[in-house]
């Protein structure tokens, strides 16, 4: 089975996804400059920890300007504006169509990545602003699968921390992340971005201890973004103690947080600021952990899947070959005459009646036949 996949290269693919405005591109830019600085240091000082510049691919066709220079850019291949015009599409339709067009050429990108992967540590993919364009499209799935079969791949889900402080937005973000994680089955890292504006402490608390999330829910409205900031130690009376009814949203989230508890156990989370660079080294450490998870769990499963597919294909081929051989044998013997009923399959000539059945076949001879008024004959005939 081990020969189904090539040995894993040293590079790890990092697919960066997240809601529009969560800071994906800024994060990729900061990560790039952070690694570049480390690589420069390593070149100058042999004592410094080894580091390499990442190889960055941008697949957002609609982005105006990026804070970094990508190595491969979808905008060099597809003109988003012309796609919108020519196909008469709106902004999102044009992004999706541009991505589809680019995906038809993704094998070329993979070849470039494959060639460089032995000398790289990170291949980073920056995805379109609207998360669903990548996560729920055929192109997104093709690109993800293609990368994940070529090199260790991890998914990084960027979260806009200051906009996730209300229990309802926090929960919807987590449910979205959960659905993507179970769909892709790849190692997953949650990046709480913009920590320069908002500490992610509240989110880590909610993830580690669902009772603290329930406490925040009990304190007030689920859509209130300031709920998390209440004094943690102050005992908050529950809705029942206050003699109030919890809203439908509060009850729903109360039960859902129990379900998400399982999801949090399989998760790595880290806080970073793409503005200041704080937390980038923690993030890189998580990438190493996630790479190991890919090698331990995802890759063996993928190998098994590919080996099974290969086996099925070879069985199918064998049975097709057998069928072909049988058919050829049959057509070779078809020329030999066989003892046959001589009227079989022939057209009956009404003038000669040559092929009419033998007397007695249809129940009798001339004497027992029936008179046919139309042609003045007996049927069946002798
Ligand atoms: N304060 C702060 N702002 C950030 C951070 N990361 C991104 N932003 C801002 O968030 C906005 C959206 O960022 P962008 O990278 O374009 O988001 P994308 O759509 O996910 O690629 C921009 O105005 C960024 O300047 C951060 O760590 N801190
Ligand atoms: Mg972006």
Image: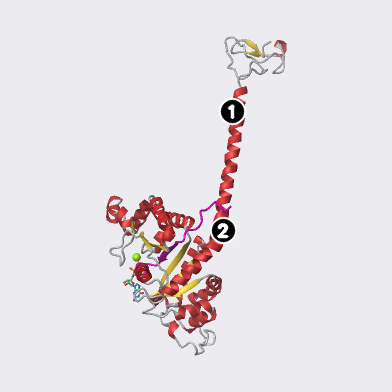
Q: Secondary structure at mark 2?
A: helix
Q: Is residue 251 visible?
A: yes
Give the magenta range: 1-25
Q: Nearer the viewer, residue 149 or 345?
A: 149
Q: Earlier in the sequence, mark 2 or mark 1?
A: 2
The residue depicted at 67 percent of the width and 17 percent of the height is: 341
Is ligand 2 closer than 8 angstroms to the Cβ of mark 1? no
| Residue 328: mark | 1
Main SS class of the magenta portion in the image: loop
Colour pattern: secondary structure
Q: Quadrant of residue 353?
A: top right
Q: Nearer the viewer, residue 92 or 16?
A: 16
Q: Quadrant of residue 266?
A: bottom right
Q: Is residue 16 magenta?
A: yes
Residue carrying label 2: 300
Whole-percent x and y of residue 322?
Answer: 61, 35
Q: Is residue 172 visible?
A: no
Whole-percent x and y of residue 276?
Answer: 35, 76
Whole-percent x and y of residue 381?
Answer: 67, 11
- In the displayed structure, 256 sits above or below 119; it is below
Whole-percent x and y of residue 157?
Answer: 44, 68
Question: Within 10 Å of the Cα at label 1, are there few (<14), some (14-19), or many (20+) other Cα atoms?
Answer: few
The residue depicted at 34 percent of the width and 75 percent of the height is: 275
Q: Nearer the viewer, residue 335 or 382?
A: 335
Marks 2/1: CA distance? 42 Å
Instruction: Tell me if 325 is positioned left or right of 184 in this view.
Output: right
């Amino acid at each position: 089975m081990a020969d189904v996949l090539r040995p894993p290269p040293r590079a790890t693919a990092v697919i960066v996804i997240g809601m529009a405005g969560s800071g994906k591109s800024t994060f990729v830019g900061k990560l790039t400059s952070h690694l570049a600085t480390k690589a420069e240091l390593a070149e100058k000082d042999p004592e410094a920890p080894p580091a390499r510049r990442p190889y960055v691919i941008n697949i957002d066709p609609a982005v105006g300007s990026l804070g970094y220079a990508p190595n491969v850019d979808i905008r060099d291949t597809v003109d988003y504006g012309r796609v919108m015009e020519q196909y008469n599409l709106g902004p999102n339709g044009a992004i999706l169509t541009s991505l589809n067009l680019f995906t038809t050429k993704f094998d070329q990108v993979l070849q470039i990545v494959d060639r460089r992967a032995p000398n790289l540590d990170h291949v980073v993919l920056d995805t379109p602003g609207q998360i669903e364009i990548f996560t729920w499209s055929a192109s997104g799935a093709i690109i993800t699968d293609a990368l994940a079969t070529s090199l260790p791949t991890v998914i990084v889900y960027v979260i806009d921390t200051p906009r996730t402080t209300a229990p309802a937005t926090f929960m919807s973000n987590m449910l979205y992340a959960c659905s993507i994680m179970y769909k892709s089955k790849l190692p997953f890292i949650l990046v709480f971005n913009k920590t320069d504006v908002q500490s992610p402490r509240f989110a880590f608390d909610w993830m580690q201890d669902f009772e603290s999330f329930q406490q925040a829910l009990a304190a007030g409205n689920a859509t209130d973004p300031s709920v998390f900031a209440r004094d943690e130690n102050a005992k908050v009376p529950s809705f029942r103690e206050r003699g109030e009814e919890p809203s439908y949203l509060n009850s729903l989230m109360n039960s859902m947080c129990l379900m998400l508890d399982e999801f949090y156990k399989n998760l790595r989370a880290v806080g970073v600021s793409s503005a200041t660079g704080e937390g980038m080294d923690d993030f890189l450490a998580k990438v190493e952990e996630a790479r190991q998870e890919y090698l331990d769990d995802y890759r063996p499963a993928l190998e098994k899947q590919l080996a099974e597919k290969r086996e099925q294909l070879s069985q199918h081929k064998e049975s097709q070959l057998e069928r072909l051989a049988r058919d050829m044998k049959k057509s070779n013997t078809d020329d030999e005459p066989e003892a046959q009923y001589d009227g079989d399959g022939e057209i009956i000539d009404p003038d000669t009646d040559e092929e009419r059945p033998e007397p007695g076949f249809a129940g009798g001879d001339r004497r027992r036949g029936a008179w046919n008024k139309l042609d003045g004959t007996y049927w069946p005939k002798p």
